[in-house]
Image: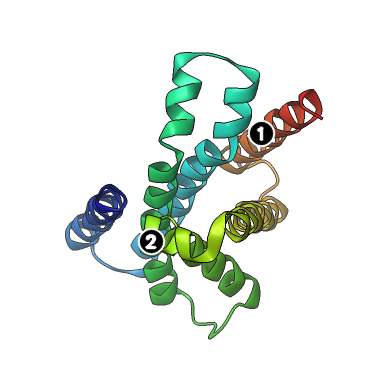
Amino acid sequence: MRRSLAVFGLTLLLSGGAVLIYLNNAGSGENQLNLMLRLSAWGALLIYLIVFVARPLKQLIKAPFSRRLLQNRRYVGVALAAVMTVHLVLLLQVNEQAFNFGGAIVYALLFLMLLTSFDGAAAKIGPRNWRWLHKAGLYGLGIGYLGAIGRELLDAPLDPVYLALTVFMFAAITIRAMAYWKYR
């Protein structure tokens, strides 16, 4: 539990601190907030992809790096929750829309997964419920990311960042599908 809390706190401090330092130096206008919003989303997506492929990579590639990645997936997931918390704070600063139902579901799943990343809470809900929650959350976050990337690609179809993120997402889905079919 202490390690998960330390990872969350440190990641929150580093990512939130970086945003605050930037905004303090560059100003906190709409352009600066939008830039930080995008960077936090992109960073969170890359962390998410590590969590998403950790188990399938271990199944497909029997190597020390894949074993270590799977062993530390919990902490990478906790770091993801911290970066997404910073992203949420930025969203609340920028977004004039009062409520986004899809976003609320994604964040609810994210924070439920975070809470059950601590041993005591995980034990209370039991292994079966824990697996169900974390699988639903993992796929729910992925659907949220695909929707966000899709919206951006509709606005700017040749944006190299969103094209690259799309490639990364589909590569991760392919890795997961390959592991699924290999072991089914």
Q: Quadrant of residue 92?
A: bottom left
Q: Is residue 56 above or below residue 87?
A: above
**Along the horizontal axis of the image, is 104 left or right of 81?**
right
List x then y, in percent, for residue 134: 58, 54
**Residue ID for mark 1:** 167
Who is closer to the viewer here, 110 or 64?
A: 64
List x then y, in percent, for residue 180: 76, 32
At mark 1, the secondary structure is helix
**Residue ID for mark 2:** 120
**Along the horizontal axis of the image, is 10 left or right of 117?**
left
- The image's colouring method is rainbow
Q: Quadrant of residue 91?
A: bottom left
**Which residue is found at the position 66% from the left and 33% from the top?**
167
List x then y, in percent, for residue 146: 67, 51
Q: The C terminus appears in which quarter of the rendering?
A: top right
Mark 2 and mark 1: Cα distance apart in space: 38 Å
**Which residue is found at the position 45% from the left and 19% from the top?**
65
**Along the horizontal axis of the image, is 31 left or right of 147?**
left
Q: Earlier in the sequence, mark 2 or mark 1?
A: 2
**Which residue is found at the position 69% from the left and 57% from the top?**
147
At mark 2, the secondary structure is helix
Question: Badge 2 local density, few (<14 within 10 Å), some, or many (20+)?
Answer: few
Question: Badge 1 local density, few (<14 within 10 Å), some, or many (20+)?
Answer: few
**Which residue is found at the position 22% from the left and 61% from the top?**
20
Which residue in the rendered view is the most extreme toward the bottom? Answer: 98
Q: Is residue 8 above or below residue 63?
A: below
Q: Quadrant of residue 69?
A: top left
Q: Is residue 54 above or below residue 89?
A: above
Q: Please, what is the three-letter code of the amino acid marked with disc 2?
A: Gly
Q: Is residue 3 above or below residue 182?
A: below
